[in-house]
Image: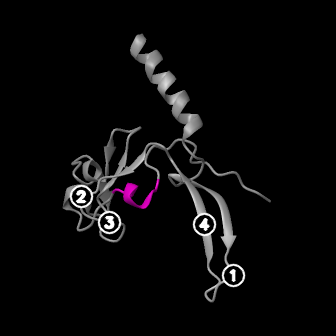
Amino acid sequence: MIKKIYKFFRFCVAYFRIPSGYYCYKYKEVIWDKDEKNEPTVKTKLCPYWDMIEDLPYQRNGYCHYLGYGDQEINNDENNLFKNIKTGEITSAPDMPFGTGLLWDQCKECGIKERIKDYE
């Protein structure tokens, strides 16, 4: 019973800290600089649970402290299966020629507040 209460409490705290949308960050503001390129500067606020492990290779170094795992664990999971839509062949994540985890790119894996409202 205590484990269920702790899990629920942990989810409630995380729900208010994790940003909405499909990414592990939210936009704070966009600043248009008056320079020769006229490119915007985008200020974001990262999810407090997202992290990057510097010792791991690029595109395999994202980590989520809320989930307790990262791209390395996702890419090595034998139960993480993918189906080739052209051939119908089913492949596990370790057999893929590239990593399947997208935490390195700050894409959410937790699924919390992923829904985006439609604005009309």
Whichever of labels 3 and 2 marks the residue nearer the N terminus, that label is 2
Horizontally, residue 27 falls left or right of residue 65, namely: right
**Residue 64, which numbered label?**
none
Does residue 106 show up magenta in the picture?
yes
Query: Decide: marks 3, 4 in contact (CB < 8 A)?
Result: no
Residue situated in front as seen by the camera: 41 or 60: 41
Whichever of labels 4 and 1 marks the residue nearer the N terminus, that label is 1
Mark-to-mark CA distance, 3 and 4: 36 Å
Disc 3: CA contacts within 10 A as few (<14), some (14-19) or many (>=20): few
**Residue 34, which numbered label?**
1
Q: Residue 92 location, x and y as percent?
A: 23, 55
Q: Residue 63 location, x and y as percent?
A: 35, 49
Does residue 7 show up magenta in the picture?
no
Q: Residue at x 21, y 51 (%)?
A: 76
Q: Which residues are magenta?
A: 101-107
Residue 11 visible in the snapshot = yes
Query: Which one is closest to the eye, mark 3 or mark 4?
Result: 4
Query: Decide: marks 2, 4 in contact (CB < 8 A)?
Result: no
Residue situated in front as seen by the camera: 89 or 98: 98
Disc 4: CA contacts within 10 A as few (<14), some (14-19) or many (>=20): few
Mark 4: amino acid: Val
Q: Is residue 59 above or below residue 48?
A: below
Residue placed under numbered mark 3 in the picture: 84
Judged from the image, the secondary structure of the residue bearing numbered disc 3 is loop
Horizontally, residue 72 falls left or right of residue 23, namely: left
Q: Is residue 45 above or below residue 18?
A: below
Residue placed under numbered mark 2 in the picture: 56
Mark 2: amino acid: Leu
Name the outermost residue toward the right.
Answer: 120
Judged from the image, the secondary structure of the residue bearing numbered disc 4 is strand
Residue placed under numbered mark 4 in the picture: 42
Question: Where the N terminus falls, by quadrant?
Answer: top left
